[in-house]
Image (tube, helix red, strand yellow):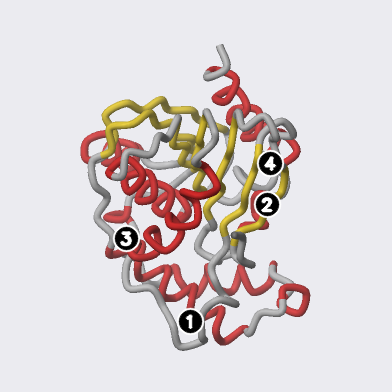
């Protein structure tokens, strides 16, 4: 059963491929809208923060709790599919990773985990960045269209920011593609490889953290589509 925080975008009746896109720091997955056109033959779902399913006083206490909340729903969506892919941009990569870990523990199959410019949490200790991030998001989001309360939105983003800074990623043995920007620090990739990923392919795109999902969406979409095609062979 779908809720308002799970948006079905395309449907593959053959049950071949399903892609779950996890929301970034904003809690809103519309950031992926330019990518969806690349996957007309797959079922695609956008995962949003449950703004409407919870009260304005409710906040998740950890990335683990956040992932547990969604995995109960995602398991039903993916259970009949041959190929399951999790995609997470930025903060969404942490939720995608934790969800993949839960799936693995419960013996549900993930074909590949795809992280897009997700920063290793240890590198996210600069609290001065939050004001810049929240101002950028407020300028870009149409709160009237989405029927969102700005004060609750600020609270959710602030909590998500805290959750990512305090999260410790665990080892993941499944297949991973890590798509990163050319200006990303070497230390970021080093920490992911050393502490988390055993089987990772790295793809670099000439972009910064924001343009990789906005202006470079075509390059990003092509690369993710190639990952899907790899599993068709």
**Front label number (1 vs 3):** 3
**Front label number (2 vs 3):** 2
Tell me whether circle 1 and circle 3 mark residues in contact (CB < 8 Å).
no
Q: In which quarter of the image is residue 28?
A: bottom right
Q: Position of residue 87 (x, y in %)?
A: 51, 43
Q: Which of marks 2 and 4 is nearer the N terminus?
A: 2
Indicate left or right for 99 with 6 as reference.
Answer: left
Q: How far apart are marks 1 and 3 (CA)?
A: 19 Å
Give the residue pinned by disc 2.
8
Give the residue pinned by disc 3.
64
Q: Which of marks 2 and 3 is nearer the N terminus?
A: 2
**Front label number (2 vs 1):** 2
| 220 relative to 162, above or below | above
Q: How far apart are marks 2 and 3 (CA)?
A: 24 Å
Tell me whether circle 4 and circle 1 mark residues in contact (CB < 8 Å).
no
Q: Which residue is drawn at 61% across and 68% down?
A: 136
Residue at disc 3, secondary structure: helix
Give the residue pinned by disc 1.
155
Say which quadrant the N terminus sits in: bottom right
Q: Nearer the viewer, residue 63 or 9?
A: 9
Tell me whether circle 4 and circle 3 mark residues in contact (CB < 8 Å).
no
Q: Quadrant of residue 26?
A: bottom right
Q: Residue 35 carries which label?
A: 4
Q: Earlier in the sequence, mark 4 or mark 3?
A: 4
Q: Nearer the viewer, residue 171 or 78?
A: 78
**Front label number (2 vs 4):** 2
Residue at disc 2, secondary structure: strand
Residue at disc 4, secondary structure: loop
């Amino acid at each position: 059963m779908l809720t308002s925080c799970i948006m079905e975008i395309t449907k593959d009746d053959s049950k071949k491929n399903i892609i779950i896109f996890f929301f970034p720091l904003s809690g809103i997955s519309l950031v992926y809208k330019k990518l969806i056109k690349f996957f007309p033959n797959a079922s695609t779902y956008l995962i949003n923060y449950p703004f409407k399913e919870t009260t304005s006083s409710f906040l998740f206490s950890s990335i683990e709790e956040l992932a547990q909340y969604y995995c109960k729903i995602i398991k039903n969506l993916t259970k009949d599919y041959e190929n399951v892919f999790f995609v997470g941009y930025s903060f969404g990569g942490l939720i995608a990773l934790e969800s993949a870990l839960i799936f693995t523990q419960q013996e549900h199959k993930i074909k590949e985990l795809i992280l897009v410019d997700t920063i290793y949490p240890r590198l996210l200790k600069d609290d001065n960045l939050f004001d810049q991030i929240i101002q950028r998001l407020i300028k870009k989001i149409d709160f009237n269209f989405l029927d969102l309360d700005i004060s609750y939105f600020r609270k959710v983003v602030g909590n998500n920011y805290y959750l990512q800074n305090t999260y410790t990623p665990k080892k993941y043995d499944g297949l991973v593609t890590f798509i990163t920007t050319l200006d990303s620090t070497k230390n970021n990739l080093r920490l992911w490889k050393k502490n988390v990923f055993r089987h990772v392919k790295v793809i670099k795109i000439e972009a910064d953290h924001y343009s990789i999902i906005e202006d470079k969406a075509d390059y990003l979409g092509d690369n993710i589509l190639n990952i899907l095609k790899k599993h068709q062979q």
